[in-house]
Image (spheres, rainbow, N blue to C red):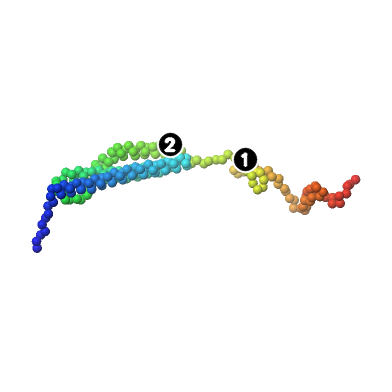
Amino acid sequence: MTQAPIITPSPDKLVDLRIAHLNMVQGAVTRMAGFSASAKTFCITILAAIIALAVQAGTAKLALDAIVAVICLGFLDLYYLTLELRFRAAYERIAQRPLSEAADLRIKPAKFSLACVGKAARSLSILLFYIPILLACIAAFVYGPTDERKPTEQLSGRSVEGLGGARQIEPADPKADGSGSTVRDTAAVKRIDPRQPIVPAEINAGRTIRAGQPTNTTGSRHD
């Protein structure tokens, strides 16, 4: 059984393989940098939404949510920045390998190390972005208002038209029974005595006879 001959690429082919390999690693570095920028964009978007809700509600309690969001997105950005540094180290290692190993096209980042994480944490893109935002959120949570705004409506001297006539809303009396406001009906209220029969109103000779008044149906005059 004969063994297949080993084909050795030409030097020009090895150079092309090395360039293609470095381009693939550079693509991974570009993706990691894009993910890091996306984490910063998400952080700004979430903070803008939380600030809008906090201003509308008049409370600084939402600053705690902003602190949690900043910390989580900061760690995510740190993770992608660490991967970017590891791929950059792999790029330099591949570029320094001998040309005879150009046929090895494996893409693998450098080994994880605490030194790489520390270098990423000391990056200005992390320190100058997340630290000021985190301090501002902590200051807003500590020194900001903690009670929600409860809009109160002053009711004084206003009239409300209803089916029963005009009604005037008066401010509540502090000595009252605790009700929020007193509604006084300005329309006339008739009290009916159940012991007195109800006499319908009659119209006689151009004048109105109201209930309870004596009527003179003969039209004679009294002396």
Horizontally, is 100 left or right of 144 in the view? Answer: left
Horizontally, is 44 left or right of 109 in the view? Answer: right
Q: Which residue is mark 1?
A: 158
Inspect the image, locate mark 2, and give the three-letter code of the amino acid beneath it: Tyr
The residue drawn where x is 19% and y is 50% is: 105
Provide residue 22's location: percent of width, then percent of height: 21, 46
Q: Give the residue at the far bottom of this rendering.
A: 1
Quadrant of the image containing the C terminus: top right
Residue 14 position (above or below residue 136): below
The residue drawn where x is 39% and y is 44% is: 46
Q: Give the residue at the far left of this rendering.
A: 2
Tag 2's secondary structure? helix
Q: Which disc, if any, is residue 143?
A: 2
Q: Residues within 10 Å of mark 2 (few under 14, many from 20)?
A: few
Q: Quadrant of residue 78?
A: top left
Which one is in front, 19 or 48?
A: 19
The residue drawn where x is 39% and y is 42% is: 47
Residue 71 visible within the image: no
The residue drawn where x is 59% and y is 40% is: 155
Q: Quadrant of residue 178?
A: top right
Contact? badges 1 and 2 (CB < 8 Å) = no
Q: Give the residue at the far right of this rendering.
A: 223
Provide residue 153's location: percent of width, then percent of height: 56, 40
